[in-house]
């Protein structure tokens, strides 16, 4: 018992080295994830560019396959949300033992979920892809991409959880450094395996899936080594993480986020399905438009990390006023960054679209989509910032309800109605603005109520 106590005290003492909320800033927490995601977006751009040489069918196939992977990652992302909220709260209260326990528990839960979802996709990949009504060539390519990509998800689970725990603890630089290595490998493999460069075989769609899977699995191996070797700010901990009380708490925080993720992905797939009914060119344009606006999304994701970390840590440190203030700071910076970047990308949408693919019809629709999406960026920024502030505090139900209202009750039904009325595809794209506007208003109302601060009850 004395040895275990010594280990506990040793882990607890490490909390003195942790940056606590009063020493953290929105920008200090945001810029490393932004840099890391910029590198990730460059991988996405190179992936689309490499695959774009294979034709519109290949671009549509990769985009469709990626969306199906994201759908089945929804449960994993929910566990990441729960991990962030609970680890941030533990770090804010200077309880590194609990942070270690939560991390170990989250890895176990995520691994089980990833194995289950991988099995489901491998067995029913063709059925899932068939709902989009792609032409036979694009459908076959999408099934191939999806089946290969999903096999790597269980291996990547460890890195996803450890990365979430590190960011919640305020260490946003280590995941960035590992991301640099991972993305460089991904770019090298993409260039080599898709079109047969650097002496590698030309594998096309198969090469794109393998490049992404191999590179990010290697990143996970690096994170696991550092964690087991005791070189990360969140310690390895010891046995005893799997208690019923801790498991119930993780599930209580995570399951609304899981429902939200499933609702979001279902809504996005429904919206994507409506776009797909217009044709392959419209689908390719949608995929390219999303990649053009990736910079804006990257900025939002970076500030969302800061918002969640600060709200969780400040509440863990029993400082609700600072938690409330940090949310407003995050929202203001996110709105400014995403609005400016969205407009800048819209002005240069056409030449960027031509860079991705040499197809006049696809470029035309992509430019329209980018301009419409750029107008929604201020409202989308509220979802990134205030939504993450609520989730970091443990209030995962409110964002779930707001997502259901905006996406399932407004955007998708309205888009389907417009399709039924035979309106042009740009009208379908325009439903994005209404969706994000409504969600932004609802998030502001919930945030100003301050009830989100009292949702998560953490036992001492």
Image (spheres, rainbow, N blue to C red):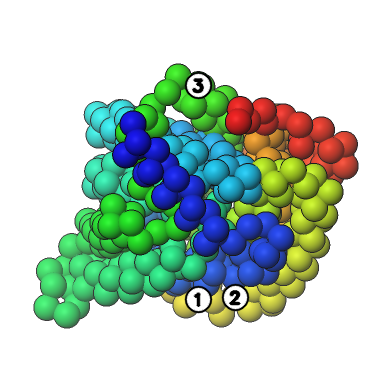
Asked which secondary structure carries label 2, the reply is: helix
Q: Is residue 19 left or right of residue 156?
A: right
User: Which mark sits nearer the N-terminus, 3 or 1?
Assistant: 3
User: Which mark sits nearer the N-terminus, 2 or 3?
Assistant: 3
| Disc 3 to disc 1, C-alpha distance | 55 Å
In this view of the protein, which residue sits in the foreground, 196 or 233?
Answer: 233
Q: Which mark is residue 86?
A: none
Q: Are marks 2 and 3 in contact (CB under 8 Å)?
A: no
Of badges 3 and 1, the one in the foreground is 3
In the depicted structure, whether residue 42 falls above or below residue 19: below
Q: Position of residue 358 (x, y in %)?
A: 44, 74
In this view of the protein, which residue sits in the foreground, 145 or 38?
Answer: 38
Q: Are marks 2 and 1 in contact (CB under 8 Å)?
A: yes
| Residue placed under numbered mark 1 in the picture | 354
Asked which secondary structure carries label 1, the reply is: helix
Q: Which mark is residue 245?
A: 3
Q: Is residue 428 left or right of residue 281?
A: right
Q: Position of residue 161 (x, y in %)?
A: 42, 46
Q: Is residue 202 left or right of residue 170?
A: left
Q: Position of residue 403 (x, y in %)?
A: 68, 36
Q: Quadrant of residue 195?
A: bottom left
Q: Which mark is residue 350?
A: 2
Q: Quadrant of residue 213?
A: bottom left
Q: Name the residue located 76 percent from the left edge and 31 percent from the top edge.
A: 454
Tag 3: Cα neighbours inside 10 Å, few (<14), some, or many (≥20)? few
């Amino acid at each position: 018992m004395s040895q275990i106590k010594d280990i506990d005290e040793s882990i607890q003492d490490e909390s003195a080295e942790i940056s606590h909320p009063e020493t953290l800033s929105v920008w200090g927490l945001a810029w490393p994830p932004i840099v890391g995601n910029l590198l990730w977006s460059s991988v996405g751009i190179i992936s689309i560019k490499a695959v774009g040489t294979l034709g519109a069918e290949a671009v549509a196939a990769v985009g469709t396959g990626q969306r199906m992977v994201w759908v089945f990652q929804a449960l994993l992302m929910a566990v990441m949300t729960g991990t962030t909220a609970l680890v941030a709260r533990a770090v804010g209260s200077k309880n590194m033992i609990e942070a270690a326990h939560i991390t170990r528990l989250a890895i176990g839960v995520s691994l089980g979920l990833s194995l289950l979802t991988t099995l489901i996709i491998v067995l029913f990949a063709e059925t899932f892809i068939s709902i989009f009504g792609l032409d036979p060539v694009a459908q076959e390519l999408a099934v191939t991409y999806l089946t290969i990509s999903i096999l790597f998800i269980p291996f990547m689970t460890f890195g996803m959880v450890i990365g979430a725990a590190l960011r919640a603890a305020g260490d946003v630089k280590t995941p960035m450094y590992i991301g640099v290595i991972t993305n460089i490998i991904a770019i090298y493999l993409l260039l080599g395996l898709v079109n047969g460069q650097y002496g590698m075989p030309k594998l096309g769609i198969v090469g794109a899936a393998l490049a992404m899977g191999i590179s990010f699995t290697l990143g996970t191996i690096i994170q696991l080594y550092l964690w087991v070797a005791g070189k990360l700010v969140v310690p390895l901990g010891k046995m005893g993480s799997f208690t019923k009380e801790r498991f119930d708490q993780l599930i209580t925080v995570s399951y609304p986020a899981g429902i939200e993720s499933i609702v979001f992905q279902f809504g996005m797939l429904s919206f994507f399905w409506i776009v797909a009914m217009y044709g392959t060119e419209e689908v390719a344009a949608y995929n390219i438009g999303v990649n053009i606006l990736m910079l804006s999304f990257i900025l939002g994701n970076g500030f969302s990390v800061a918002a969640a970390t600060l709200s969780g840590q400040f509440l863990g440190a029993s400082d609700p006023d600072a938690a409330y203030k940090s949310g407003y700071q995050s929202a203001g910076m996110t709105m400014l960054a995403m609005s400016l970047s969205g407009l800048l990308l819209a002005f240069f949408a056409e030449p960027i679209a031509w860079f991705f693919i040499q197809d006049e019809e696809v470029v035309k629709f992509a430019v329209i989509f980018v301009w419409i999406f750029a107008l929604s960026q201020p409202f989308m920024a509220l979802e990134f910032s205030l939504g993450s502030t609520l989730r970091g505090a443990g209030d995962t139900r409110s964002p779930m309800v707001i997502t259901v209202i905006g996406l399932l009750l407004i955007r998708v039904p309205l888009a389907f109605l417009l399709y039924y009325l035979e309106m042009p595809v740009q009208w379908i794209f325009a439903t994005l603005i209404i969706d994000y506007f409504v969600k932004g208003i609802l998030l502001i109302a919930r945030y100003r109520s301050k009830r989100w601060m009292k949702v998560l009850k953490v036992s001492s």
